[in-house]
Amino acid sequence: MQNREIKKRRTFGIISHPDAGKTTLTEKLLLFGGAIQKAGTVKRNKAEKTATSDFMEIEKQRGISVATSVMGFEYLNHKINILDTPGHKDFAEDTYRTLTAVDSVILVIDSVKGVEEQTRKLMQVCRMRHTPVIIFINKMDREGKEHFDLLEELEKELNISVRPLSWPIGIGSTFKGVYHLHKHKLNLYSANKKSISEDYIPIQDLADTKLDEILGEKASNTLRDEVDLVDSVFEPFDVSLYRSGYLAPVFFGSAINNFGVQELLETFIEIAPEPQGRATDTRFVEPDEKKFTGFVFKIHANLDPKHRDRIAFCRICSGKFERNTFYHHVRLNKNLKFASPTSFMADNKSLVEEAWPGDVIGLYDSGNFKIGDTLTEGEIMNFVGIPSFSPEIFKELENTDPFKTKQLEKGITQLSDEGVAQLFTQNPGNRKIIGTVGELQFEVIQFRLLQEYGASCRFRPMNTSKANWVSSEDPEVLAKFLYSNSSKIAYDKEERPVFLAGSQWDIDYALGQYPKIQFHETSEWDRAEISA
């Protein structure tokens, strides 16, 4: 039973630079899976049709994705779990953490713009983890870069070998469809076709004169020449190289017009890996182990603004999860039972009785969870490799409505629990300092505090460029250091001291004065050292 359920599952993330069409592709995959009946749009002037995976109010207004959405559906007797990630660089933390919870990735490339900055950074993370990647080159209905130039750019910029498994016929105004190299069939394009197309034409031999009748002699000859060139330039597709993260199969299409999407989905199911094992600080966990394990990679408050809920997203790594069963929370060293675990279709949730490796479930949380927490059936271990980040921008939070002080305190605490930002408190005065890796996060925090908690605020810039967590093996030295540097010391949510530096000079000077003090760039330094 367990092995059968594992083999059925495919859990992957969709990543891209902003505006490459990632959210549109996600919706078209959901359409093919029958999970939704009508695609939305992320255009701001059509707020009533916002994208299924963009469920936060600010996402609907801004037309960008700023939080990871989790969606599941059944297709061809497989359970598909999609994690749609934010594209904007200011929310890369959320994407990086999400990549720890998936077994493979679909990378969306804009055929007009090619490889962009955020694409390179995301691929670096995938290569570091040897995550299998499928590339979908989108927007073939627009005038973009020449096909072979794009493939060369992908290999050079992303440092990965590629192998086309579908091939476009023309581009922009001459785009006629895609030819599935892997399955030898043709799918013809017509603009603005919003329904799902299954009008495939089998073409076993490109020399067949039937191709000339369908496409015209010029387009047919171009297709034949280009496919010959593909076969001569690129090595045959090797699924083992793909699953090892060294070879990326490439598909071409137009997500907004449902073109190339079905070829992508069906090939993905065929070649993508089933749920994989995960490393912990004590051993490697295999998915087919009988005992349940899982880890929290994301926390989100107020998925439903009408109910002040807080949900921890848990990736199941091994065994079988069952509702109303006690599981051990390793960090807190206590057992917890979950009466209402949920599965997701963006903001729509349904009760889960059981779940298997590869699944992502939502656990209603009253404040027990932090990102990176591990659940087991009693074994003491922690899953590793979930990144934490040192903030780069620091601002003081100012309350602009003293009557809503409690709401502001609760809101900023919950948002920092989600990993949207890091919260530091400085005394005297109980000053709240917010640290982020991008400016846009402050806008999102301000918006969500007002919309979800009724608390208004503003942010005051600070002369701080770096936060370092402070420790020492000598408690007296630590106490003396904290006292003499009190104007630069704040405390995180766990009451751990943090040195707020204006420049590298401040750090060097402090270390020169107190050589027995250690500085750490992330809040998880203690866990990182244990796992090492």
Image (cartoon, grey):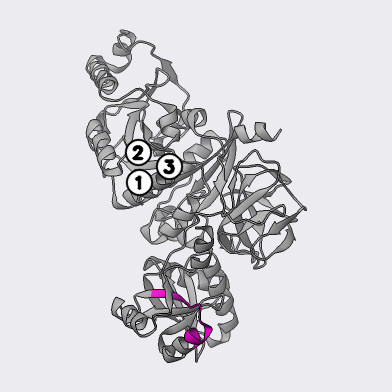
Left or right of residue 405, residue 17 in this image: left
Label 3 secondary element = loop
Q: Position of residue 31 (x, y in %)?
A: 52, 37
Q: Which mark is residue 130?
A: 3
**Nearer-N-terminus badge (3/1):** 1
Residue 330 makes an appearance in the image: yes
Amino acid type at circle 3 is His
> Considering only vertical position in the picture, is 24 above or below 510?
above
In the rendered structure, which segment of residues is drawn in magenta?
467-479
Amino acid type at circle 1 is Ala
| Magenta run includes residue 77 | no
Q: Which residue is painted at 37% across and 33% down in the image?
A: 247
Q: Which residue is painted at 59% across and 39% down in the image?
A: 73
The foreground one among 344 and 148 is: 148
**Nearer-N-terminus badge (1/2):** 1
Label 1 secondary element = loop
Q: Are marks 1 and 2 in contact (CB under 8 Å)?
A: yes
Q: Position of residue 71 (x, y in %)?
A: 56, 46
Distance from the alpha carbon under mark 1 to that under mark 2: 7 Å
Q: Quarter of the image holding residue 223? A: top left
- Comparing labels 3 and 1, the label whose residue is closer to the camera: 3
Q: Position of residue 176 (x, y in %)?
A: 31, 25
Q: Which residue is mark 2?
A: 138
**Nearer-N-terminus badge (2/3):** 3
